Image (cartoon, rainbow, N blue to C red):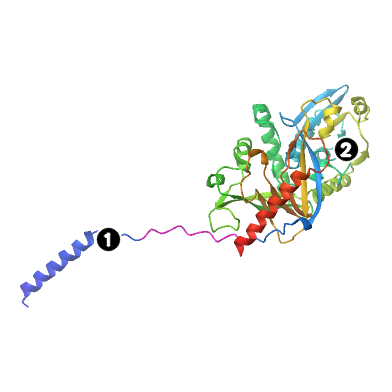
């Protein structure tokens, strides 16, 4: 091969390399997004032979939501703080703080608080923090209050109001209360107060359920954006539930028996006094020696202060034997309710038992167990957890 041939072949090779660089390359197969590791959860042992009690609580509901205002009551200042529906455990630090600020307008630093549920106890503590000498007057004290019958998580929109009754002024008051309460509860997290963070799962076959924030569309519209818990939609294979998807979010859990006892102990350590008594008429209230009175009587305000709006939302909880390994909550069953009025169900694990709920009967004053509701809630949970067990195996 002579020099001219070598140069010729070299030139052809260079052209070949250039053409190869311009030629379209074979397309690589698309890379699928890596699937999250599957969530593995122990299964609740749900059965009728593990039921240890069923409790009833009448939540104080007002269609136009809670009352938080100061009135003149003869020569006294009467501050109303009642009507929180199913949101009392969540909102009480907020409305209690705002009620105590209203009390500062009075020069006297002695105050009476009527009621020893969570709204009364937090109001009393907030008054103490502002320098008031406080006496609680109540017909019952923990563990015999309606607050003790709560599920209870941080659900500040639960059973709160009818949407058509909302006003801009009330919305602003609500959002202020939520922000205060959420911060207070965070600072109390730990075993002393029975407050902790857990994961909540909502089984669903509806992909759109993963969108939105706290409490669905209604709750999101009410809640301040800064505390709307983000949701994660778990895909098939990423969760242990017998549905196509599961919505995962964090939730603050409150154990009522621990929490209310701790609040009462704090109140007494700060020099508070408790008087067991019931108020029958407004003159009974006017006879109190204190000139600053905070009314936290819940449903008692209907008769005592002639509130025609006030009505109960009857709640009913069935409790299973405790399971220490269960550290997650659930909302919903293995399938959507057949009809909207069939309601929903939810499970919350606590040290005093696995709590099953989902009852909210409007304007029902009965303290008797509703057996139909009890059957619905327990059987729906038995189905859910049995199917979880089958999926796992």
Q: Which residues are magenta?
A: 29-39
Image side of residue 342 versus residue 204, left or right: right
Residue at the image point whose x is 9% and y is 71% from the top: 7
Q: Earlier in the sequence, mark 2 or mark 1?
A: 1
In what quadrant of the picture does the N terminus appear? bottom left
> In what element is the residue under mark 1?
loop
Please provide percent x and percent y for residue 44: 70, 58
The residue pinned by badge 2 equals 134
Q: Nearer the viewer, residue 374 or 317?
A: 374
Q: Nearer the viewer, residue 122 or 67?
A: 67
Residue at the image point whose x is 93% and y is 39% from the top: 276
> In what element is the residue under mark 2?
strand
Q: CA distance from mark 2 to mark 1?
A: 81 Å
The residue pinned by badge 1 equals 25
Q: What kind of secondary structure does the magenta stretch mostly adopt?
A: loop
243 w.r.t. 5: above or below:
above
352 w.r.t. 108: above or below:
below
Image side of residue 186 versus residue 228, left or right: right
């Amino acid at each position: 091969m002579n020099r001219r041939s070598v140069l010729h072949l070299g030139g052809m090779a260079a052209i070949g390399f250039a053409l190869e660089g311009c030629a379209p390359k074979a397309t690589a197969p698309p890379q699928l997004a890596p699937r999250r590791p599957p969530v593995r959860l122990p299964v609740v042992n749900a059965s009728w032979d593990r039921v240890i009690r069923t409790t009833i609580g009448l939540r104080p509901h007002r269609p136009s939501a809670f009352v938080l205002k100061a009135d003149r009551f003869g020569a006294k200042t009467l501050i109303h703080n009642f009507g929180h529906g199913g949101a009392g455990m969540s909102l009480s630090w907020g409305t209690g703080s705002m009620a105590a600020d209203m009390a500062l307008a009075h020069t006297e630093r002695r105050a009476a608080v009527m009621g020893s549920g969570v709204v009364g106890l937090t109001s009393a503590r907030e008054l103490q923090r502002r320098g008031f000498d406080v006496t609680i007057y109540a017909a019952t004290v923990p563990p015999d209050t309606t607050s003790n019958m709560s599920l209870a998580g941080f659900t500040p929109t639960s059973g709160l109001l009818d949407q058509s009754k909302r006003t801009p002024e009330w919305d602003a008051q609500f959002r202020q209360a939520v922000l205060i309460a959420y911060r207070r509860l965070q600072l109390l997290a730990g075993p002393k107060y029975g407050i902790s963070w857990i994961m909540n799962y909502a089984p669903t076959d509806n992909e759109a359920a993963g969108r939105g924030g706290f409490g669905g569309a209604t709750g999101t519209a009410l809640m301040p954006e800064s505390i709307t818990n983000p949701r994660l939609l778990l895909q098939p294979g990423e969760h242990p539930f017998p549905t196509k998807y599961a919505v995962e979010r964090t939730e603050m859990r409150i154990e009522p028996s621990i929490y209310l006892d701790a609040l009462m102990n704090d109140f007494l350590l700060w020099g508070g006094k408790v008087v067991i008594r019931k108020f029958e008429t407004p003159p009974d209230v006017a006879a109190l020696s204190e000139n600053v009175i905070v009314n936290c009587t819940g449903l008692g305000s209907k008769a005592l202060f002639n509130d025609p709006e006030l009505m109960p939302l009857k709640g009913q909880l069935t409790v299973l034997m405790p399971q220490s390994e269960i550290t997650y909550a659930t909302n919903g069953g293995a399938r959507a309710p057949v009809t909207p009025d069939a309601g929903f169900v939810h499970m919350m694990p606590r040290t005093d038992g696995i709590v099953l709920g989902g009852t909210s009967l409007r304007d029902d004053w009965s303290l008797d167990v509703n057996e139909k509701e009890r059957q619905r809630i327990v059987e729906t949970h038995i189905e859910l957890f049995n199917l979880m067990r089958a999926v796992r195996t």
